Amino acid sequence: MSADLAPVIAAGTRWLLTAFPPAPGAYSRALAEAQARQAVTLAAALRYPTPLDAQLLHLLGPGGSAGLDRLSGAEHGGDADAGWRTWVDETVVSWAACLLADPALAADAHRLVDRGRTGEVTRLTRPGDHEHRAAPLLRHPDLLEPVAARHRALLRDRLDNENAALG
C-alpha cells in the first residue's frame, strides 16, 4: 500500500466514525476505528491500485466530503478543524461502507487486492460480537445504505473485472 494514500485513509476513517459513532468507551472506540480503517484501507487499495494512481490522486485531489456530508445531513459550518474533510474521497468511503455492510464482499475484495498491501482485515471480514457491539451504527447495513449505494455499482464492476482478469 502506498504511503501516499495515508491522508485519504485517515480522512475516510474519521468521516465514517463521525457519521456513524461507536458505542461509548475507549475499547469500543478503538474497535470501531480498527474496523473503519480496515474498510477504508481496502477500499483505497481497490480504488488506487498503483503508485501512479496515488500520485494522480495527489495531483487532482480526492474531492472532499461535501457530497457525503449532504447525504448524511451533517452540518460542519463551525468546525474549526475541517481541513481533514478535503482529503475524504467519496468513492473510497462509499466502497468502505459496502465492505462494512457485507463481510463476504470484504473477504472477496481482500483476496483480490491483498498481495501484502492491505494488512490484516479480520475485524472487517470476520466481525464477532465485540466488533458489532463496539460499532453498531458502523456495521448496520440499513444505516450504511445511502452511503454504500452511492458507488456500489462501480465497486461491483471493479471486483468483477479483477475476477475476470484473474480467472
Image: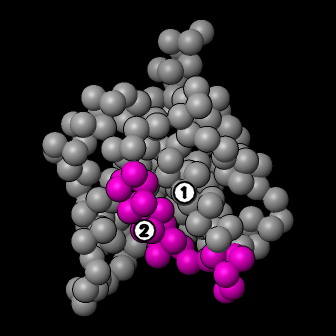
Q: How many marks?
A: 2
Range of magenta residues: 6-29
Q: Quick one: label 1, few (<14), some, or many (20+) residues within 10 Å?
A: many
Q: In this view, does 15 lie to the left or right of 120?
A: left
Mark 2: few/some/many CA within 10 Å (<14, 14-19, 20+):
many
Q: Name the outermost residue toward the bottom.
A: 78
Work out whether 61 lies above or below 131: above
Pointer 2 residue: 15
Q: Quadrant of residue 75?
A: bottom left
Q: Is 108 left or right of 9, judged from the image as shown? A: right
Question: In the rendered structure, which disc, 1 or 2, sits on the residue that comes first in sequence?
Answer: 2
What is the x, y in percent for residue 36?
Answer: 56, 60
- Looking at the rendered structure, the kind of residue marked 2 is Trp
What kind of residue is marked 1? Arg
Give SS at disc 2.
helix
Toward the viewer: 142 or 63? 63
Residue 21 within the magenta-colored segment of the rendering: yes
Please tell me which residue is depicted at 53% across the width and 43% down the height of the picture: 42
Task: Work out whether residue 65 or residue 71 is closer to the camera in this orientation and state it.
Answer: 65
The residue drawn where x is 54% and y is 57% is: 37
Looking at the rendering, in which quadrant would you find the C terminus? top right
